[in-house]
Image (spheres, rainbow, N blue to C red):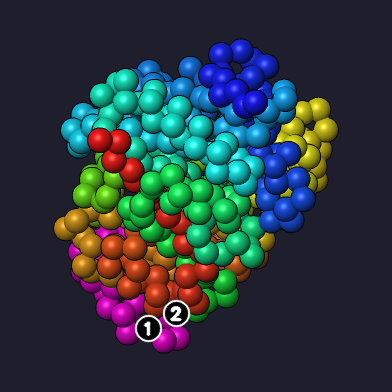
Amino acid sequence: MMEIRKVVSNKDLKRFITFPHKLYKNDENYVPELNLVIKNMLSQKNPFLKHSEMALFLAIKRDVVVGRIAAIYNQTHLDIYQDNTGFFGFFDAINDVAVAKQLFETCEQWLAKKGITRVIGPTNLTTNDSCGFLIEGFQYPPMILMPYNKMYYNDLCTQLGYNKLVDLNSYNMENCDALEKYHNIYARAINTMAANRIKIRNISSKTFAEDIDKLRFVYNKSNENNWGFMPLNEEEFKVMAADLKTTTPFDLTLIAEKDNEMIGFLIAVPNLNQVFKFIKNGKLFPFGIFQFLLKKRSVNSARIMILGILDEYKNIGLDFALYQSIKEALNKRNIFNAEACYVLENNQRMNSILTKLSHEIDKRYRIYEKRLI
């Protein structure tokens, strides 16, 4: 007999957070997310939960957790798109369609009671966070803040009536020197930037608050026409910026300015998953912190995480120049292995650029949808 239990106690919250560590115990590519980070994301400390709602559910058989899921009611999404869409996230389960069926049905019922007629996922919690099920690239470990899942999750999803909505691409940029092949494109971009008084610099510790303020505007404005984009309010963006500040050196945070006004940015994050894989069961304390401090300096890969350029500057080669600048910054840190992600499959411009700058797409992720009525 299986029970679907809504998480209300601290004990069950702990079981929800730690279940993946047991499920992926023998998977050599699995990297445990830090329990503390996930706990904060799922707590009322997360500014997302000041305007939206979430319910967590566990599937339990004979007092053993066999699955989990989150039902997410995103008020910001509903205000913008007005499409009666809810979301599922944080899905993990054993390879049993009956377990998945009860978890998804519970999630769908919770959302339907709130007037939701379509479900999209996975998003953990929003499209600004980790989202999608990995569908290609299972032979590689995940980059920092990227999802990783069992191959059978996609089969479970389709068996339960979910269909592909959109795919997301990740590009392998290891030791890639596009300048040799595309020197003319780069030279034109640099000349155009100079003629328009556009410069690239790092975010500064001295002007961090001002830079972050401007960055939020460009982030929201440059992404507003992208599928499923969720603009971040001031509090949400400051939380994200604070998280980045703890993990990302300033030399990997590039901003493009014209006459001291920000018009674009690119941020890369050291791949701390190379460290987290050694922190047993996601426990940073009391002993995991020593592994973190010991191995942090050995990180030699990175995720090129966020790119944004205002529309009026998208056709001058600025994106190409930003990618070349971040490559040089990474190389100075002896980082030659990088992955650029995510890129929507229908974002023709970004896919075209990254096809030139990278070796290949090495991972794909899929977001699913299901109509409830």
Of the 4 image quadrants, the one containing the C terminus is top left
In the image, what residue occupies the spot 51% across and 32% down? 103
Pick the front one: 156 or 359: 156
Q: Is residue 199 magenta?
A: yes
- Give the x, y percent position of residue 20: 66, 39
Give the vertical position of 186 relative to 223 (above or below).
below
What is the three-letter code of the residue carrying label 2?
Ala
- Give the x, y percent position of residue 26: 77, 50
Q: Count residues near mark 1 (Cα–Cα under 10 Å), then give few for <14, some for 14-19, many for 20+.
A: few
Residue, far top: 9
Pick the front one: 332 or 222: 222
Whether residue 207 is visible, yes or no, is no
Q: Main secondary structure of the magenta part?
A: helix
- Give the x, y percent position of residue 340: 47, 61
Spatial distance from mark 1 to mark 2, Cα to Cα?
6 Å
What is the three-letter code of the residue carrying label 1?
Tyr
Q: Are marks 1 and 2 in contact (CB under 8 Å)?
A: yes
Give the vertical position of 18 relative to 134 (above or below).
above
Position of residue 237 in the picture relative to residue 77 (left or right)? right
Q: Secondary structure at mark 1?
A: helix
The mark found on residue 182 in the picture is: 1
Q: Which residues are magenta?
A: 178-200
Q: Which residue is mark 2?
A: 178
Position of residue 243 in the picture relative to residue 274 (left or right)? left
Position of residue 191 in the picture relative to residue 52 (left or right)? left
